């Protein structure tokens, strides 16, 4: 083996070895999605990811009849081991009925989620953004209750009877 081949082999080993060592750290697969509750006055229309955040921005639509003043987002981190809350934030937004708006929220830091998956010995995980509560401009609030008790729908009841908290 020539000196050039030996130096080339040494360079390849020094270059590739650190990458192979770090592969398990970056091997966690993350997916990002949204969950919309049936009775929520605000709907998540779309999500945008970036290199840094799984939920860099979201598009919202006010499907209710009252103007919105703030939205409380929650990120659930789902693995084979179960669900846990990874992040949550209240975001002020002025959203009139039937209006649509894109908000930059910068939630679900991807490196933090990868570290969380790694610490749970999980190869993959799902991050789910949902709207947990809405503050109306007139002072009222809507809080999700569907996750805890399911969605009991009675076609004979009006939406106001199903959720008396919604204004």
Image (spheres, rainbow, N blue to C red):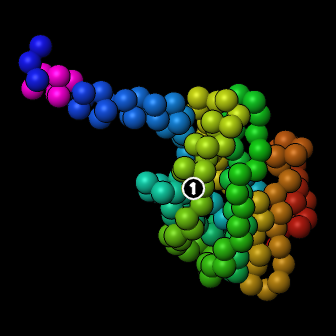
* Image spot of residue 98 (x, y percent): 59, 72
Q: Is residue 29 visible?
A: no
Q: Is residue 107 left or right of residue 158?
A: left
* Image spot of residue 63 (x, y percent): 65, 66
163 to 121, vertically: above or below: below
Q: Quadrant of the N terminus?
A: top left
Q: Is residue 144 visible?
A: yes
99 to 133, vertically: above or below: below
Point out the stretch of residues depicted in magenta. 4-9
Q: Is residue 9 left or right of residue 143?
A: left
Q: Secondary structure at mark 1?
A: strand
Q: Residue at x 57, y 68 (%)?
A: 105
Q: Residue at x 87, y 46 (%)?
A: 148
Q: Quadrant of the C terminus?
A: bottom right
Look at the image and say whether residue 7 sits in the magenta stretch.
Answer: yes
Q: Is residue 62 left or right of residue 166?
A: left
Look at the image and say whether residue 84 sits in the magenta stretch.
Answer: no
State the residue position of label 1.
109
Magenta stretch: dominant SS? Answer: helix
Q: Quadrant of residue 39?
A: bottom right
109 to 2, vertically: above or below: below
């Amino acid at each position: 083996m020539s000196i050039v081949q030996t130096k080339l082999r040494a360079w390849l080993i020094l270059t590739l070895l650190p990458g192979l060592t770090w592969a398990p750290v970056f091997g966690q697969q993350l997916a990002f999605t949204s969950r919309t509750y049936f009775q929520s006055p605000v709907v998540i229309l779309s999500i945008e990811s970036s290199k840094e955040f799984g939920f860099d921005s979201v598009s919202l639509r006010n499907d209710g009849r009252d103007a919105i003043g703030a939205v409380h987002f929650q990120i659930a981190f789902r693995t084979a081991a179960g669900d846990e809350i990874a992040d949550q934030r209240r975001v002020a937004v002025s959203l009139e009925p039937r209006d649509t708006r894109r908000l930059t929220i910068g939630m679900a830091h991807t490196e933090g989620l990868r570290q969380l998956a790694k610490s749970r010995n999980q190869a993959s995980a799902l991050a789910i953004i949902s709207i947990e509560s809405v503050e109306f401009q007139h002072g009222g609030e809507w809080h999700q209750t569907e996750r805890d008790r399911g969605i009991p729908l009675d076609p004979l009841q009006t939406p106001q009877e199903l959720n008396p908290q919604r204004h």
